[in-house]
């Protein structure tokens, strides 16, 4: 599970004395340029890697190899998102590099924005909404671009002329009827046939479900345990009326890219920090070579047990948000190392995990009697890849397999150098002043917002996802497409409930309840209003995390209406929300947490669907319009992503003697570099 940053979480303007990262980071480089550029609804930032210099040479080498492995899978994600993405990317890049006409015209500028968006989203569908986006140029201008570019480097299929290629690709880019959604969540339609994502070809929802049901049945028959995440790393294709599975592995689908990942992982294994880490990396290599999901589980068990190594990584087919059925995972990687000072804060939380579990408002039969291995740390990201690049989570909790989480625990991290970069890049952007209900709310956010949101992330990741248990007989996949938003809601509610608990102050995590108030303000403001800035006019909410936030905020608003717990009011024609009773709101969070835990534990699909559909999906069109208009005046791009740092090894006689970190600030340059030097998969042919 990933936790993504929200614009509302980036509002803190002041550095709080409790936040060691900020103190630490402001010293080395005051002039560091965090915000690099803005286009469409995107802003491109940079992040620093504080502490890299103090690592040993061997650790730096490990980070370097893992970083290369993180970049090697980029093409996989493009292809997973939509089968034409690599072809389109290469077409656009060829024009960008070789077009012979006027490169300074406003039209070419618009073409560039489209290309930058394709890079950002790893394809032609918006990285967050999953809707197709379109270039703001005409088809005829696009034809002139192709005509004035030397013909050699276009990714034409074998035997295809450039003309035929052009006619094939233009509707794919421009037509609103072709592949309008990467991931459809519309109830009542066949989710697979209406989704452009490339996990299924010619396969219906019913056929996919039947296929995996049969696999599980076969597994039981042959004495297996059916706990394996069937279908996680494969594509389902219907050939001659028969559904077949193509597995991602060396020698299978995406082999050329996976071979490179394996190559760099083998180097990484050679400089592992310890024996356990070496075995962990080797089992990941095994998995990539065989595609065997039992090996993937074995790897995850080793990985989750390695809390000692300072350098760590995520690498694999992991998150299932890109598949409407929530079965198949996109490829991603994050390379990181421990932020020792901030880890102390997370450690306090995880050391008390059992207390939190025991005291939660959830029905006792849904609680874990023994919370195992909830480990938490704060990390410094060193490299982002695949589905974590350039748009990046700020917290990660893995592995996802419920049985591993239950028996071996999970590893939970907060990525603080990324949060810090967000905060720095959005200082003074006016968002808080525009949407906060009053001066007191602004003051609280400035003073405590950063600490509050870091704590929320810790609680969400370290405790929230790891809490609770399924009833015997519940597998964990009963909630289908509502599983992701409900799981995020569960983790958020756990965090919201406990950030308002006196235990926080008792544990020394903060010393004023205003911290919790700041978090409640920002959560409700975001869930009821400001996150609407990320939705296009006329659209409903599709993204899991956004559904979760509106679900929680509007449920709490409605439940507390009689007592005026949350108030909606207007001032000078503008809408605001304000919390009147924080204690009552906390009780409401607890009540909803109990219900969502019940839904998950019992696998109650009906109740889950009703909650999400009633509170999490529909948008009030008038409020939406107003929020967009107010937001537009501020001129802030709602989504952010990052340029990666570059690790440059210096060698003597073929041996690495030192590794330097550089911070490029050329977004297009980095993307082109990746497309040239870290690209291993063919276009459609
Ligand atoms: Zn989460």
Image (cartoon, rainbow, N blue to C red):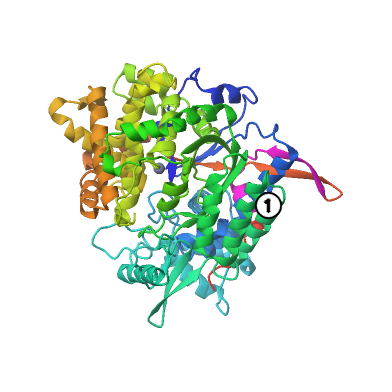
Would you say residue 469 sits in the magenta stretch? no
User: Which residue is depicted at the point 55% across and 74% down?
Assistant: 157
Viewer-nearest residue: 606 or 466: 466
Extent of the magenta region: 655-675
Numbered-mark total:
1
Q: Secondary structure at mark 1?
A: helix
In-image side of 268 versus 160 (left or right)? right
* Above or below for 199 versus 640: below
User: Which residue is depicted at the point 68% across and 38% down?
Assistant: 662
User: Would you call the spot at circle 1 few (<14 residues within 10 Å), some (14-19), or many (20 or more)?
Assistant: many
In-image side of 596 versus 238 (left or right)? left
Looking at the image, which residue sits at the far left?
Answer: 562
* Above or below for 436 versus 311: above
* Residue 595 % position (x, y): 23, 42
Residue 140 can be seen, yes or no? yes
Splitting the image into 4 quarters, where does residue 312 fall?
Answer: top right
* Above or below for 13 versus 311: above
Viewer-nearest residue: 281 or 442: 281
Looking at the image, which residue sits at the far right?
Answer: 653
Q: Which residue is mark 1?
A: 269
Splitting the image into 4 quarters, where does residue 236 fall?
Answer: bottom left
User: Which residue is depicted at the point 53% across and 27% down?
Assistant: 344
Looking at the image, which residue sits at the far bottom?
Answer: 240
* Residue 3 % position (x, y): 43, 41
* Above or below for 128 versus 30: below
Viewer-nearest residue: 574 or 363: 363
Splitting the image into 4 quarters, where does residue 230 fall?
Answer: bottom left
* Residue 477 % position (x, y): 33, 57
The quadrant of the rendered image in which ligand 1 is seen is top left
**What quarter of the picture does the C terminus occupy?**
bottom right
């Amino acid at each position: 599970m990933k936790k993504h940053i929200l614009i509302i979480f980036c509002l803190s303007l002041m550095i709080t004395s409790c936040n060691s990262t900020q103190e630490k980071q402001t010293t080395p480089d005051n002039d560091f340029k965090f915000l690099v550029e803005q286009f469409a609804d995107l802003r491109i930032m940079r992040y620093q890697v504080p502490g890299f210099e103090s690592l040993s040479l061997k650790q730096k080498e490990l980070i370097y190899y893992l970083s290369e492995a993180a970049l090697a899978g980029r093409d996989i994600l493009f292809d997973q998102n939509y089968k034409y993405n690599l072809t389109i990317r290469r077409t656009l890049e060829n024009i960008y590099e070789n077009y012979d006409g006027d490169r300074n015209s406003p039209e070419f500028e618009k073409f560039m924005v489209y290309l930058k968006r394709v890079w950002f989203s790893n394809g032609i569908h918006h990285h967050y909404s999953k809707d197709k986006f379109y270039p703001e140029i005409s088809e005829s201008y696009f034809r002139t671009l192709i005509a004035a570019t030397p013909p050699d480097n276009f990714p034409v299929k074998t035997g295809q002329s450039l003309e035929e290629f052009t006619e094939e690709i233009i509707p794919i880019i421009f037509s609103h009827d072709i592949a309008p959604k990467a991931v459809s969540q519309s109830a009542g339609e066949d989710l697979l046939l209406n989704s452009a994502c490339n996990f299924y070809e010619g396969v219906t929802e019913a056929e996919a479900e039947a296929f995996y049901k049969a696999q599980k049945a076969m597994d039981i028959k042959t004495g297996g345990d059916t706990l394996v995440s069937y279908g996680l790393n494969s594509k389902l294709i219907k050939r001659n009326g028969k559904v077949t599975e193509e597995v991602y592995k060396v020698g299978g689908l995406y082999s050329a890219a996976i071979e490179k990942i394996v190559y760099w992982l083998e180097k990484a294994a050679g400089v592992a920090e310890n024996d356990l880490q070496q075995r962990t990396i080797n089992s990941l290599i095994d998995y990539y070579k065989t595609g065997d999901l039992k090996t993937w589980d074995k790897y995850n068990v080793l990985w989750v047990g390695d809390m000692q190594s300072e350098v760590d990584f995520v690498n694999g087919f992991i998150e299932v948000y890109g598949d409407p059925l929530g079965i198949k995972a996109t490829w991603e990687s994050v390379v990181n190392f421990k932020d020792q000072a901030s880890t102390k804060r997370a450690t306090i939380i995880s050391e008390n995990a059992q207390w939190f579990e025991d005291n939660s408002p959830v029905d006792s039969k849904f609680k874990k009697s023994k919370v195992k291995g909830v480990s938490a740390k704060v990390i410094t990201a060193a490299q982002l890849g695949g589905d974590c690049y350039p748009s990046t989570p700020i917290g990660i909790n893995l592995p996802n397999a419920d049985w591993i989480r239950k028996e071996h625990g999970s590893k939970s991290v907060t990525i603080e150098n990324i949060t810090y970069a967000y905060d720095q890049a959005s200082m003074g952007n006016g968002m808080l002043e525009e949407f906060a209900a009053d001066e007191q709310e602004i003051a609280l956010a400035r003073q405590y917002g950063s600490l509050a949101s870091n704590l929320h992330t810790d609680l969400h990741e370290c405790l929230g996802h790891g809490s609770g248990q399924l009833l015997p007989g519940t597998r964990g996949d009963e909630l289908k497409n509502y599983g992701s938003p409900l799981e995020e809601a569960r983790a958020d509610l756990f965090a919201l409930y406990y950030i308002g608990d006196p235990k926080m102050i008792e544990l020394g995590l903060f010393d004023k309840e205003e911290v919790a108030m700041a978090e409640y303000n920002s959560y409700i403001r975001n869930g009821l209003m400001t996150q609407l800035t990320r939705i296009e006019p006329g659209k409903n909410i599709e993204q899991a995390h956004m559904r979760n936030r509106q679900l929680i905020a509007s449920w709490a608003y409605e439940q507390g209406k009689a007592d005026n717990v949350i108030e909606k009011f207007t001032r000078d024609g503008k809408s605001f929300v304000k919390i009147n009773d924080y204690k009552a709101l906390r009780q409401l969070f607890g009540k909803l947490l109990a219900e969502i835990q019940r839904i998950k534990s019992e696998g109650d699909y009906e109740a889950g669907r009703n909650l999400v559909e009633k509170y999490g999906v529909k948008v009030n069109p008038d409020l939406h319009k107003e929020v967009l208009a107010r937001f537009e005046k501020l001129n802030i791009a709602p989504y952010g992503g990052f340029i990666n740092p570059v690790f440059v090894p210096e060698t003597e006689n073929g041996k690495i003697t030192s590794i330097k970190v550089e911070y490029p600030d050329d977004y297009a340059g980095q993307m082109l570099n990746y497309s040239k030097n870290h690209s291993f998969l063919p276009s459609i042919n």
